[in-house]
């Protein structure tokens, strides 16, 4: 008994010492460190293009409106092509009834094509028009695993397939070749695997870029005549896997250039916020202390040290109170000591503060009906919603008067249409909304884009310290598609069993460290930004309209809409890139380069 008491006291004094040290260090300013990667958020009128595509449509996206798989995969490819600025024509093959001579003719104006359906019988004779087009220089992506059919069997040898089973194989993981995708050299497990890929033996002439851990080919290319096939033998169609499909597309051409965002961001939701009083079951178990002391003596110092280790400027999102008042009269929180303490430390470390909510009630007005009951109320009136943001703005800018707050994160990623409109119309201080990438009941799900009202949409991708297989694959996918990483977590994850409380902070912080290390290893050149920096990066990204001209000796990239600088990925399937003028070139692996374009015209020598 005595021993235990001593232990508790020991813990408390260590806690106090840690707090004292942090306060001391913070006072003398030793901790101050910017990330060095600041990107300014621009006034909205700087953004004049919204992922505009050129009139010169070089890609044919072939869908089949009568096919369920096609209905799923086609919109994904449309988003992928738009984000990569590939101008395309959408072509519903099921409505096409003229003879193959016409189809031959039709194909002539395209450089690339994607088959976004799995049933090739719909092509009839036209399937041979497509393969002939490839033979004469066309570049065709088999966009999703085909099902075996007479038409498909007719062309499979041209795709490099020597033998093929009747049944599909279960694909439970994904491994990229080292010189293909970023984050390669690791096995990404697939959540909820099913029989989804063709079991094939490939000819030695085929080049495999990705496979399962059992070496079943998932992405490969095959030269045919003067053209090329790329086969994406992978059938998990959702937002979380886009990077696998986009990367397959990049293999079609000898050199392919596409814009990327280039940003890694970490958000701390509900931080600063009122610290819960009392004890948390697992915090007490592991650390023998109350919540408040744990936050200041254990959690926060660890988060800061991870930030230092991985060069992360955190973006904290303020909650003023945890009372769930949703009326029009909202009292101001008078106890501000924790806000000053945590908030200033975050800012001194190069971090940023944004808005989360007056309280944790989503901006949903009286008529809103929640699809899922998370225990939230609705606001009494539009006025009440307005007042809540107004009060939060006054409270936050009062405390942090020397910094600009521009990021809004909706509580639990829930935001009604009415609430969204209110932000755009009434709160010009809010310039970017960081909600969520994935769909969900009530979720304000986003793409990386700029909305009509000028607000920059910057979705978050993964969360918490339990980074499961699905999130790992999603993070891998987005690193390759947009060159982004975006993560959020809450201090009260340690109080919630669903978010890993029982696992304990020791293990959870290790998981977080691992994820951060994965970003550092996979993308050492990615910019580490705050929430507003991410928004600035998205503004520049959506505005560019690049044109690439490839000759035997040179690659020229002309950018329309370059604000100051922009980033591109360049996939080089043939040869190598050497000298650059008008930008800065970084080799990421043997086939992928990161270009920082600083001039409208960038010229790069090919080797
Ligand atoms: Zn929250």
Image (spheres, rainbow, N blue to C red):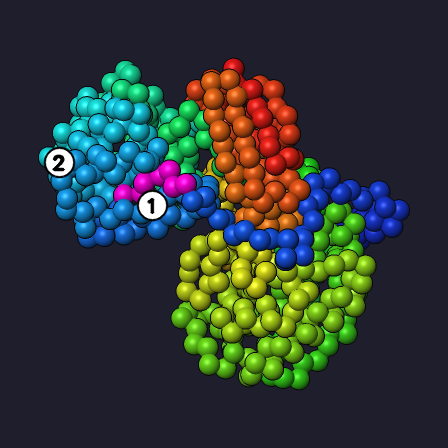
Q: In which quarter of the image is the N terminus?
A: bottom right
Mark 2 CB within 8 Å of ligand 1: no
Q: Name the residue under label 2.
A: 125
In primary-sequence order, the first of circles 1 and 2 is: 1
Disc 2: CA contacts within 10 A as few (<14), some (14-19) or many (>=20):
few
What separation in Å lies between label 1 and label 2 (alpha carbons)? Answer: 21 Å
The residue at 35%/33% (across/down) is: 111
- Above or below, 224 against 89 in this view is above
The residue at 46%/77% (across/down) is: 368
Q: In this view, does 495 lie to the left or right of 155?
A: right
What residue span does the magenta drawing correspond to?
56-62
Quadrant of residue 208 within the rendered picture: top left
Q: Mark 1 points at which residue?
A: 89
Question: Label 2's element?
Answer: loop
The residue at 53%/62% (across/down) is: 452
Q: Nearer the viewer, residue 540 or 179?
A: 540
Q: Do the residues labelled 1 and 2 touch (CB within 8 Å)?
A: no
Residue 355 rendering spot, x and y as whole percentages: 65, 63
Disc 1: CA contacts within 10 A as few (<14), some (14-19) or many (>=20):
some
Q: Is residue 260 magenta?
A: no
């Amino acid at each position: 008994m005595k021993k235990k008491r001593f232990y508790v006291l020991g813990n408390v004094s260590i806690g106090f010492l840690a707090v004292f040290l942090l306060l001391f260090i913070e006072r003398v300013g030793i901790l101050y460190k910017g990330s060095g990667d600041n990107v300014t958020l621009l006034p909205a009128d700087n953004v004049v293009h919204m992922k505009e595509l050129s009139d010169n449509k070089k890609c044919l996206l072939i869908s089949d409106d009568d096919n369920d798989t096609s209905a799923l995969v086609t919109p994904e490819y449309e988003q992928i092509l738009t984000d990569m600025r590939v101008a395309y024509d959408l072509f519903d093959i099921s409505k096409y009834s003229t003879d193959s001579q016409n189809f031959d003719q039709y194909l002539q104006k395209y450089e690339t094509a994607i088959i976004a359906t799995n049933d090739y019988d719909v092509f009839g004779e036209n399937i041979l028009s497509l393969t002939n087009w490839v033979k004469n220089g066309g570049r065709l992506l088999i966009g999703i695993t085909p099902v075996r059919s007479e038409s498909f069997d007719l062309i499979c040898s041209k795709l490099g397939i020597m033998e093929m089973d009747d049944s599909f194989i279960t694909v439970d993981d994904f491994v990229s070749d080292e010189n293909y995708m970023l984050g390669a050299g690791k096995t990404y497990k697939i959540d909820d695997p099913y029989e989804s890929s063709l079991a094939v033996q490939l000819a030695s002439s085929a080049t495999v870029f990705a496979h399962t851990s059992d070496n079943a080919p998932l992405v490969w290319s095959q030269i045919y005549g003067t053209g090329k096939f790329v086969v994406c033998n992978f059938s998990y169609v959702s937002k979380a896997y886009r990077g696998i499909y986009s990367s397959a597309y990049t293999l079609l051409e000898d050199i392919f250039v596409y814009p990327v965002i280039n940003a890694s961001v970490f958000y701390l939701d509900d931080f600063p916020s009122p610290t819960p009083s009392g004890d948390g079951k697992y915090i007490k178990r592991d650390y023998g202390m109350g919540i408040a002391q744990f936050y200041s003596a254990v959690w926060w110092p660890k988060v800061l040290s991870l930030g230092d280790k991985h060069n992360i400027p955190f973006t904290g999102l303020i909650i003023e109170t945890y009372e769930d008042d949703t009326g029009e009269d909202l009292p101001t929180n008078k106890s501000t000591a924790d806000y000053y303490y945590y908030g200033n430390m975050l800012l001194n470390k190069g971090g940023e503060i944004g808005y989360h909510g007056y309280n944790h009630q989503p901006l949903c007005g009286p008529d809103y009906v929640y699809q899922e009951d998370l225990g939230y109320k609705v606001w009494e009136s539009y006025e009440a919603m307005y007042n809540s943001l107004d009060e939060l703005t006054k409270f936050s800018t009062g405390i942090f008067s020397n910094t600009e707050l521009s990021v809004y994160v909706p509580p639990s990623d829930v935001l009604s249409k009415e609430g969204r409109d209110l932000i755009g119309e009434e709160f010009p201080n809010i310039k970017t909304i960081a909600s969520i990438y994935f769909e969900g009941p009530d979720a304000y799900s986003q793409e990386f884009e700029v909305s009509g009202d000028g607000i920059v949409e910057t979705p978050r991708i993964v969360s918490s310290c339990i980074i499961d297989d699905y999130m790992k694959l999603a993070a891998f996918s987005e690193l390759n598609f947009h060159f982004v990483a975006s993560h959020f977590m809450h201090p009260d994850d340690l109080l919630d069993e669903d978010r890993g409380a029982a696992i304990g902070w020791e293990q959870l912080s290790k998981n977080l460290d691992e994820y951060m290390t994965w970003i550092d290893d996979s993308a050492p050149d990615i910019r580490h930004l705050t929430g507003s920096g991410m928004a600035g990066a998205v503004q520049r990204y959506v505005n560019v309209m690049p044109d690439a001209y490839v000759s035997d000796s040179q690659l020229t990239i002309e950018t329309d809409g370059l604000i100051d600088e922009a980033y591109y990925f360049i996939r080089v399937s043939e040869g190598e890139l050497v000298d650059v003028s008008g930008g800065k070139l970084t080799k990421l692996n043997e086939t992928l380069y990161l270009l920082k374009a600083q001039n409208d015209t960038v010229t790069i020598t090919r080797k």
